[in-house]
Amino acid sequence: METENLSSAEESQESAIPSASNTEVAPSGEPKPSYVKLAMRNMVRKRGKSLQHFFLTTIGLLSILIGLSYLTR
């Protein structure tokens, strides 16, 4: 009988204290996807835009490095 009272008291304490797993669970019951997973999913959806930005960044960095090497020769 005492064990039943203890278990019900423990259950009420556990329900009163929010656990870390409860805060990370989405309303549908699944855990929230990580930032990296969302970023990768977004890159796959917008493949052309991601490649365009990648190549523009690469060309920009190369032009800056070549320009600096030309100026400092």
Image: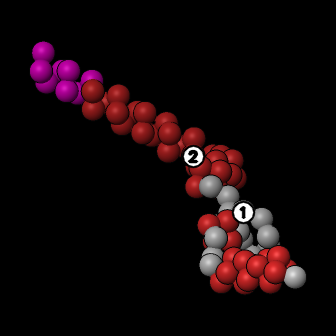
Question: Which quarter of the image is occupied by the C terminus?
Answer: top left
| Res 15 seen here | no
Name which residue lies at 27% across and 27% down. 65
Give the image quarter of residue 2. bottom right
Q: Horizontal and vertical percent for residue 62?
A: 35, 28
| Res 20 seen here | yes
Q: CA distance from mark 1 to mark 2?
A: 27 Å
Give the image quarter of residue 17. bottom right
| Residue extent of the magenta highlight | 66-73
Q: Which amino acid type corresponds to the residue marked 1 in the rendered image?
A: Pro
Q: Which residue is disc 2 drawn over?
A: 50
Which numbered tag is attached to residue 15?
A: none
Q: Which residue is disc 1 drawn over?
A: 31
Q: Horizontal and vertical percent for residue 66?
A: 27, 24
Q: Which amino acid type corresponds to the residue marked 2 in the rendered image?
A: Ser
Q: Nearer the viewer, residue 51 or 34?
A: 34
The number of callouts visible is 2
Assign the magenta stretch its main secondary structure. helix
